[in-house]
Image (spheres, coloured by chain):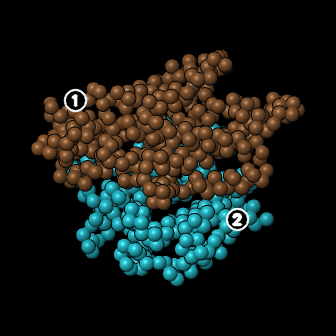
Amino acid sequence: MVFLGGQVLPGNVGRAILGPFADQRAVDALNHSLGVDRPLLVQYGTWIWNFLHGDMGTSYIFRAPVAPFVIDALGNSMKLALVAFVLVVPIGILGGVIAALNLNRPLDRIISLGGLSVTVLPEFVTGIILILIFGVWLRWLPIAAAWPKGAGFFTQLYYLILPSLPLFLVLFGYIARMARSGMIEALDSDYTRTAVLKGLPWRTVIWRHVLRNALLPTITVIATQTGYLIGGLVVIETLFRYQGIGSLIFTAARGKDFPMLEAGILTIGIVYAVATLVADFLYSVLNPRIRLGAEQ
Amino acid sequence: MTATDTPASLPAPSAPDATRRSPWGEVLHSLSRSGTFLTGLFILLFWVVCALFGQHFVPYDPLESDIINSLTPPAADHWFGTDQLGRDVFSRVIVGSRDILTVAPLATILATIAGTALGLVIGYFRGIVDDIVSRVLEAFMAIPVVIIALLAIVALGTSKITVIVVIGLSFAPIIARTVRSAVLAERELDYVAAAKLRHEGALHTMFVEILPNVIPPILVETTVRLGYAIFAVATLSFMGFGIQPPSPDWGLSISSNYGMIGGGFWWTVLFDALAIASLVIGVNLVADGVHGAFND
């Protein structure tokens, strides 16, 4: 089981990504190569650190150092991604759990089919439709994610709801599906049967026995979706004219602003690695089997 | 290389019918009774017909502008209204299926051929080749397609061929992984051992003995990938890196018109968005049906 857990974890994948990713970009920038087979994240982190502190390059277009642009954009993107995540993780898990508890009944079908349909649609399509409904027809929400300067937390949040919805919809399908299949498997297991047969109340069985086991794979999925989320951000930030890392990369790519492009993509690489690491950590905290394996 | 290539890639399940009638007949039978599959097929065929013959039956030339009648709302003479150059939106939506239904299937075919060949090789030889190639493939899979495409297109310039190659190659690893796991199961079977005893070459064993037996997962993966390819092509066109003007392509139309939706010109983007949504959902329904037919 410990071995299987190690196989499922995206940890080594994440490390592998940084190799080729950095290779292509970094060779141009620093003439410094980094192989796929150098898995030491710490080593890589130090290198990134130097890169950040040293010369990130000068933007061709803005004729100014790249770093402030990237840091600003990253902050904005984080806000957007955070709003989407905070909304989607509980609701997605809840959706999956509800679907699994109502297996093959209409509610399950609605959640599964609905989740699947919105997941397969491109973000800009759901984005456009949502803009039309909430921004143009109902006029509930602003259609551009550019809040007035110095806006407070809630004003910013208000401007971020619409842009985060397309991301929410795509992620909802994945998370709900994982939570659903995890739940089904856990509900079907011997330990659940044992718990029920020992006379524990249904509620306790669900909370203490089923959910804990069912949600483990879901956490891994949420972490792997960070990669997707970055791709989605490029599209969403363009659509909503939001100054995030995605639109930064997009603008840099269109304007052939290579230092900006490289810095943006490296930043994404770092974010991805951190997310993977956090997922590994969370997984081991929640899964005592892995923890024990490590101590032996 | 026109839209006439498109249909050939779609009804693949019937192709090897003559050689192995009973299992394939069964699959066809279950497909013909699957509501999901038939609904999806109907939507898909509708758009294929539009792509092939649309230009002959649409009321207006999709590229002809009529500035005096620009931005008129939907009415009897322009069912879906007109865009900012006075072009008929209905005609553009119908004919707009053409480019995406050329580029996406070609990309999928490229991905399938490359992915199958790669998957067969790494699944058959295993060992160090498999280890190295698999890690590299995993790394590629974790990078969002949008980012890969952005970089490739910045480097290579925009053209339909670039889009096909970029999407094809970024999807190939996923198909390779599917084929690899199918081959791993097959290579332990007696007929493979028999082929080896007959001193058949590795190429013969892979492509003549194993390949026909791993067709079902390949077909399922291909239909799923077609949905994602449409997703990717539409997104790239929306970002300005895909299909180029003056094509009436949907993603492209949305990108040139969505800036005005704040002014209430909803008809210039809504119908294109719905067209993309229907095509993507249609293909996914087909994929779902094919998956179900092979896994029952």
Tell me: residue B149, above or below residue A69. Answer: above
A197 or B120: nearer the viewer: B120
User: Which quadrant of the figure has residue B209?
Assistant: top right
Q: Chain B rendered in what hue? A: brown
Point out residue A125 in the picture as x, y percentages from the top left corner: 35, 46
Q: Which mark is residue B37?
A: none
Residue hosting label 2: A37
Q: Colour of chain A?
A: cyan
Residue depicted at x 16% and y 42%:
B66
- Residue B42 percent coordinates (x, y): 41, 25
Kindly identify which residue carries mark 1.
B59
| Residue B184 falls left or right of residue B91 | right
Dot 2: element = loop
Q: Residue at coordinates 75% horizontally, 66% vertically from top-left?
A: A295
Q: Which amino acid type is marked by label 1?
A: Pro
Which is closer to the viewer, label 2 or label 1? Answer: 1
The amino acid pointed to by label 2 is Asp
What kind of element bears circle 1? loop
Query: Residue sitting at 73 percent across and 50 percent down?
Result: B130
Query: Badge 2 local density, few (<14 within 10 Å), some, or many (20+)?
Result: few
Q: Is residue B253 left or right of residue A219?
A: left
- Image side of residue A200 versus residue A6, left or right: left
